[in-house]
Amino acid sequence: MRVRAWTLAVAGVLLVVAGTVLLLVTPAIMRRQVKANVQIDPASGMAYTMWRDIPVPFYMSLYFFEVKNPQEILRGEKPVLVQRGPYIYREYRQKSNITFHKNNTVSYREYRRYYFYPDGSAGNESDEIVLPNMLALSAALMVEDWPYALKLIFSTALKTFNETPFIKKTVREIMWGYDDPLIDFLNRIFPGVIPFKGKFGLFAQVNYWHSEQCNMIDGTAGEMWPPFLTPSNLLTFYSPDSCRTLELVFQKSDWTFDIPTFRYIAPKTMFANGTVFPPNQGFCPCRQSGVLNVSTCRHNSQVFISHPHFYNGDPVLWEAVDGLHPSEKDHALFIDIHPLTGIPLNVSIKLQLSLYIKAVQGITETGNIQPVLLPLLWFDESGSIDGPAVNTFYYFMVVLPVISQYVQYILLSAGCVLVVVALALGIVHLKKQVPRRKKVSGIVTVSREVTERSLLLPADAANTSLGQARYLMD
């Protein structure tokens, strides 16, 4: 019994020690493994492969704001818009010329290819949509301060090339460009007014801002972030669509595909003007809070970027036109990211492009247009990890840590149970030993008293006493 108790006690102590060691050492091992595997290094395996060949299928969904009353707008009435879409494109990203440098940076060239995805779209690329003539209306604002004679020449050119304030173009033309003879004319007669040649489309980028802070390309490329994120961390990434670095803030802890994640969203100050949020002063000239002037990276056209339907913006913006209905559910951008590794699992970046239009004196084509920020389109660039990638991620980042935790607690629990059982057996053994000692002590006392009395009595009496003693002992 005693040997068994000691064996259980030793085994229990060893299990408790093993569980405690795992409890203390496992987090350190996990952190070291995460650091080793999330580096963008060909030797790191999974992280480098995921960065180079992104396993997340990206889709760009476009929603156009079709103008329903172009003639009324020219007469100074309120614009009426109808949202068309989505028109969805499957996006493929390919990195080439990957070069690692000694200062722990990597340079590369990324190519993006877009393929129309008809199955999820609400129409075809051949659909025609009425939109503001960005080329003509933007150029009209650029020449607003020119002498009247030059503006007259410009206005005549618009008439000659049949440029109207509102045009009907296909989705394909709006997205990827169309030939316009006005471009060549303006480049030949008024060099510098339009800083590009060839086709005119929506997504051309240049990077020029008006302060050192605003001109910085800060944060990541929006594909991976540093590991071990906490709710106090900001998520920074450079967005080519907005021509600037964006910062997202923690909203809540959540679960994505049964994997623990942090949800990051845009703060209300993201597109606030410089008066409301001074750090944005470098992105001005500003208008109402909620829109960002990106004219310096959109060929100097008066283009503004915002959340769709002017969500989080000054109500004056969406009240100036009919057909806008901002809501958090439909128009807020977010990123769901695994905090331990910094790998995004679900992404939805939603932005809107709007054009500032107004009547320009001396250019009759602009009619009596009242100053307004007229939404052109908004897009949702989204992607979520799926297929074998999410299964592998779930196994290594959820299943294995849970198994490790269970093993730790099982070892600790089993060890504690064994120690308690050993103590109980020891106590039972001790209790059994106490009655035996009392019985032996009583027998010795009785025999001693009988012997002393027998020495003082005659032989017959002594024999009687001994008999009584035997009787008592029996």
Image (cartoon, rainbow, N blue to C red):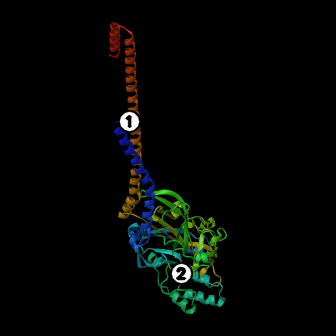
In percent of width and height, residue 83 lies at 50, 68
The answer to whether residue 2 of the structure is visible from this angle is yes
The structure residue drawn at horizontal position 58% and vertical position 71%, both measured from the top left corner, is 79
The structure residue drawn at horizontal position 57% and vertical position 92%, both measured from the top left corner, is 189
The three-letter code of the residue at mark 2 reads Val
275 left or right, relative to 457 = right
Q: Is 345 placed above or below 202 here?
A: above
In percent of width and height, residue 417 lies at 40, 41
The three-letter code of the residue at mark 1 reads Leu
Instruction: Tell me the distance, in whole angstroms, between the alpha carbons under discs 1 and 2.
Output: 81 Å
331 left or right, relative to 52 = right
53 or 352: which is nearer to us? Answer: 53
The structure residue drawn at horizontal position 41% and vertical position 59%, both measured from the top left corner, is 397
Quarter assignment of residue 285: bottom right
How packed mark 2 is, by other alpha carbons closer than 10 Å (few <14, some 14-19, many 20 or more), is some
Quarter assignment of residue 459: top left
How packed mark 1 is, by other alpha carbons closer than 10 Å (few <14, some 14-19, many 20 or more), is some
215 or 127: which is nearer to us? Answer: 215
Q: Which residue is mark 1?
A: 425
Q: Which tag is nearer the camera, tag 1 or tag 2?
A: 1
254 or 152: which is nearer to us? Answer: 254
Query: Which quadrant is the C terminus positioned in?
Result: top left
User: Closer to the N terminus: mark 1 or mark 2?
Assistant: 2
Q: Is 265 placed above or below 464 here?
A: below
In percent of width and height, residue 393 lies at 39, 62
38 or 84: which is nearer to us? Answer: 38
The answer to whether residue 53 of the structure is visible from this angle is no
In percent of width and height, residue 350 lies at 51, 67
SS for callout 1? helix
The structure residue drawn at horizontal position 39% and vertical position 18%, both measured from the top left corner, is 448
Q: Which residue is mark 2?
A: 206
SS for callout 2? loop
